[in-house]
Amino acid sequence: MKTDLTKELMEPAEQLAGEQGLEVVDLELGRQGSQLLVRVFVDRIDSSQGGVTVEQCGDYNLALSRWLDEQPELIPGSFLLEVSSPGVNRRIRKLKDFRRFVGKTVSVTAREYIEGRKKFKGELTAADDDGVAVNVEGTEYRIPHGLIHRANLEYKDW
């Protein structure tokens, strides 16, 4: 159910963000007590202006909250909505972001073993339609997109 709801929420969340000059970096669903927690990470589309501001997060939170209130069938009952910046160890999901961060240090966890390991921390050396390449201490590993469980940018490069 979480996966289906995430997919249903992503398109409208991205559309509302785009209208405000923002992009959705990640959308997570979880629980906080008995309530559903909808956590959305946004950033500016034009990163040359710096990161997203607290005011922009607040404006986006209000717009998304209003939209969700008009869709009671999506989330029956009460829910919590949290909007924030992706932070310095931001999650990487989209191909355009993998391409953007080539040359940076990343941490990637695979769904299955690839050459005897599931965790890869090193320089992101390539990103294409098939997957990504991560150089870990001189050895390059190719990780297909379908096997990436989680990928994050590592702070030390900023």
Image (cartoon, grey):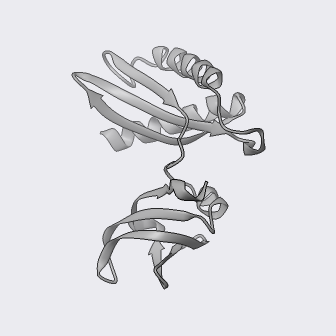
Q: Residue at (34%, 83%) from the top-left corner?
A: 115
Q: Nearer the viewer, residue 29 or 87?
A: 87
- Give residue 142's position: percent from left, percent from top: 48, 78
Horizontally, residue 63 falls left or right of residue 112, namely right
Quarter-of-image position of residue 102: bottom right
Q: Nearer the viewer, residue 35 or 68?
A: 35
Q: Residue at (48%, 71%) from the top-left corner?
A: 122
- Give residue 32's position: percent from left, percent from top: 27, 26
Horizontally, residue 112 falls left or right of residue 153, namely left
**Vertical position of residue 122 compared to residue 85: above or below:** below
Image quadrant containing the N terminus: top left
**Vertical position of residue 52 compared to residue 131: above or below:** above
The outermost residue toward the left is: 34
Q: Residue at (31%, 76%) from the top-left corner?
A: 117
Q: Residue at (72%, 33%) from the top-left corner?
A: 21
- Give residue 18's position: percent from left, percent from top: 68, 34
Res. 101 visible in picture: yes
Report the number of numbered marks.
0
**Vertical position of residue 126 compared to residue 94: above or below:** below
Res. 93 visible in picture: no
Q: Nearer the viewer, residue 22 or 64?
A: 22
- Give residue 127's position: percent from left, percent from top: 59, 70
